[in-house]
Amino acid sequence: MSEIILSAKNINKSFHDPVDVKILSDISFEITKGEFVSVIGKSGCGKSTLLYILSTMDTDYEGDLYINNELMKNKKESELAIVRNEYIGFVFQFHYLLNEFNVLENVMLPGLKLNKYSKEEVEYRAMEKLKMLGIENEALKKANQLSGGQKQRVSIARSLINDPLIIMGDEPTGNLDNKNSLIVFDIFKELAEVYNQTLLIVTHDQSFAANTKRIIEMADGRIIRQ
Amino acid sequence: MSSLLIKIAKELLLARWKQTLVAAIGVTFSISMFVALLSFMNGLNDLLDGLILNRTAHVRIYNEIKPSKNQAINLSSQFQKSHNFINSIKSSSSRLSIYNTEHIFEILDKDKRVLGYAPKISAQVFFTYGTLAITGAINGIDVTAESKLFSFKDYVTAGNAADLKNVPNSIILGKGLAEKLMANIGDVVQINTTDGNLMPLKVVGVFQSGLQDLDKVQSYSSIATAQKLMGKSNNYLTDIQVKLIDIKQAPKIAKEYAALFDCDAEDIQTANSQFETGSTVRTIISYSVGVVLLIVAGFGIYNILNMLIYEKMDTIAILKATGFSGSDVKKIFIYIALSIGIFGGLLGVLFGFGFSVIIDNIPFNTPSLPTIKTFPINYKALYYLIGIVFSLVTTYMAGFFPARKASKIDPVNIIRGK
């Protein structure tokens, strides 16, 4: 059995305003290294909420979350930021690149924040990631000069810069046409198979999910199949 | 680490450089106005203070006309234990002259707190002009000491102050007085003392203090001439004007000297208390105007940063999602605010200096102030320092609240909100 990267134990979450509504109840699962997991379910079933809890950005929940065998509860905001920086890579539905910076700088930012490598090394690594994703020619363009598919590839490159334990995606193909969706999926698949990268992708794209190794299906705040 | 935050702050700033420039111009404007206003106000203060204070002794040693403290009956051994009532005591006019002046000079010479001193004789006289007798005052002065300590020379607008010493039996008249007597340089005026002595004195100069009332009655001669005029010996002196190194010590030293020399001593603060009040009020006004300007600029920065934060919600959310903590985001916005402050403040100080120089070169001629040719400016480095510090403090304050708001932005809300 390979090592467990992320484990959720009995995670519950409710919204209290204006009335108590249970969003997630008793979510428990584990993700081991190298797994390519997709979370599917209808809109409003709580899959995105779960993702944000797992990503440590949402701290208002009950239950325990372990990332890299560390309990995330009771950690300070700044400590969680370090966890996100070091262990988690993000790909959102919208690319969320910083338009003030060029592509290369966008990819480099989390790396510079981590401050593990020198600036030159981070730059080299960023170029490697861009090459891997086939967009090294766009490196010096501003983020808003790229097409949608290219932007999403840049945000994948950015999520990879710190060699994260896990890449989390919130509908990464939700805003892309079929062709680009396919490209993004192929990238994820390659990451999982060739680089043994762990991935957790929330999607409602059935065909996308069908091609992943493991599917977690949710309905009404519960896991109904995994 | 912080260099990365500074770089991000810089990029965010440059992305909105027009707004940033407007904010910085606000700071520049208020700081430059603050510096120029303060320099000008204080220049004016110095000028007005100088009008009186620089020409007034810090401590004046003299003998007041007053009834004797030691009435004869109190000194009598027979009545020592009684309570003595004396009615209708009159002031004695025995001596206006200071006793033992040589001894006083010796002590003043030795006193380290004393910058210098100038002896003086002041007396009431009549200037006879035809059938007319005009009352006035004559001051016998030591021209050298008086010029050195009280800038006497600066106020002699016609003739030469040094002639008072060099030409025997000479006099410098106040401008108003000279006009009344229709006396020009080289003319001879007749002077009558209250004791009835008559003496002709040659006019060698005209004096203009800037205070018209003073110029209508005052005149100056050398000490020797005044002594001769009064018919007194050459140790007769009525005043010793002492200038101190630290003006604030004047009240204390005045008391000390009064006891030591057994005479009266008046300090400058008591004699001219209204001037200090005036200066203080003017300083308060200029500081408050400056601070108000800065607060207005501060609100401008606050607004612009707030807008910037609303515009950059996505950026903040993504920075937080990729591992920047709330305090990092806060620092970024504080850096933005401070760089507006530093840039605007430095430029403001430069412009403030420029404005000061311009004001300093505007001609300002007024008949009552013969030594002033342009508007007065005080180039004190302190005002520039205060300007810089104020600009940093206000921009920090203006940046603090928006920055705190930015640090509290929940990235989940932004990212899910799309």
Image (cartoon, coloured by chain):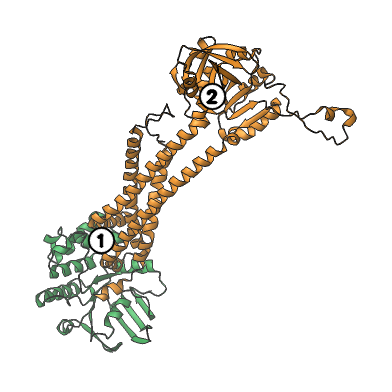
Chain colours: A green, B orange
Q: Position of residue B157 (x, y in %)?
A: 43, 21
Q: How many marks?
A: 2
Q: Nearer the viewer, residue B113 or B133?
A: B133
Question: Which disc number belongs to residue B126?
Answer: none
Residue B369 falls left or right of residue B336: right
Residue B355, position in %: x, y?
33, 39
Residue B183's x, y, as percent?
A: 47, 16
Farthest residue toward the front?
Answer: B131
Measure how far apart labels 1 and 2 are at the Cα level.
82 Å
The image quadrant where one finds the N terminus of chain B is bottom left
Task: Determine which of the numbered discs, if any, sits on residue B217 in the image.
Answer: 2
Is there CB contact under 8 Å for labels 1 and 2?
no
Query: Does residue A129 sit above or below A44 in this rendering?
Result: above
Callout 2 secondary element = helix
Comparing B53 with A40, the one in front is B53
Around disc 1, counting alpha carbons within 10 Å, would you say few (fewer than 14), some (14 to 19), or many (20 or more)?
many
Q: Is residue A44 above or below residue B195?
A: below
From the viewer's perspective, tell me whether residue B10 is left or right of residue A104.
Answer: right
Name the amino acid type tagged 2: Val
Tell me where residue A3 sits by quadrant.
Answer: bottom left
* Residue type pointed to by label 1: Leu
In the displayed structure image, the side of residue B10 where residue B365 appears, left or right: right
Q: Secondary structure at mark 1?
A: helix
Residue in the foreground of this view, choosing between B413 and B258 = B258
Q: Is residue B237 above or below residue A163?
A: above
Q: How far from the left and from the top, in percent, is residue B397?
A: 40, 57
Quadrant holding the C terminus of chain B: bottom left
* Chain label for disc 1: A
Write down the residue under mark 1.
A109
